[in-house]
Amino acid sequence: MADPITTTLSIGWLIAIIAISLWSLVWKGIALWFSGRRKQIVWFIVILIFNTAGIIPIIYLIIYRGKKAR
């Protein structure tokens, strides 16, 4: 029989992993959209390849937030 504490911790970890994955997916999607529209291939590839829990996409969006696409 499973220990209730272990089961609760496992569910907590699962919820945390899902939350971080969704957080990362949202930021990655937004950053990929903007970098693709601006034809910034290097940024697009970096954001697409590296999983950083949203850190690189957020940095990209901060740097280029006010600049218009050509």
Image (spheres, rainbow, N blue to C red):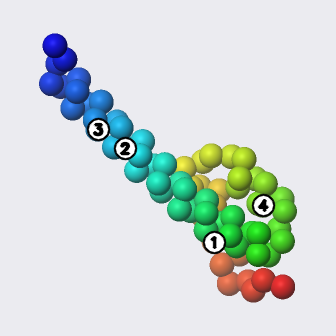
Mark 1 and mark 4 residues within 8 Å of each other at the beta carbon: no
Q: Which residue is mark 1?
A: 62
* Camera-nearest label, 1 or 4: 4
Residue 29 in the image, given as x and y percentages of width and height: 61, 63
- Decide which of tag 1 and tag 4 comes sooner along the chain: 4
Looking at the rendered image, the quarter that the N terminus falls into is top left
- Decide which of tag 2 and tag 1 comes sooner along the chain: 2
Left or right of residue 31, residue 37 in this image: right
User: Mark 3: few, some, or many residues within 10 Å (few <14, many ≥20)?
Assistant: few
- Decide which of tag 1 and tag 3 comes sooner along the chain: 3
The residue that appears at 62% across and 46% down in the rendered structure is 51
Residue 66 in the image, given as x and y percentages of width and height: 68, 84
| Amino acid marked by disc 2 | Ala
Spatial CA distance of label 1 from label 3 is 31 Å
Mark 1 and mark 3 residues within 8 Å of each other at the beta carbon: no
Check the image and report above or below for 25 versus 50: below
Check the image and report above or below for 28 versus 9: below
Spatial CA distance of label 4 from label 2 is 28 Å
Whether residue 59 can be seen here: no
| Amino acid marked by disc 4 | Trp
The residue that appears at 54% across and 56% down in the rendered structure is 25
Q: Which residue is mark 3?
A: 12
Q: Which residue is mark 2?
A: 16
Residue 62 in the image, given as x and y percentages of width and height: 63, 71
Spatial CA distance of label 1 from label 4 is 13 Å
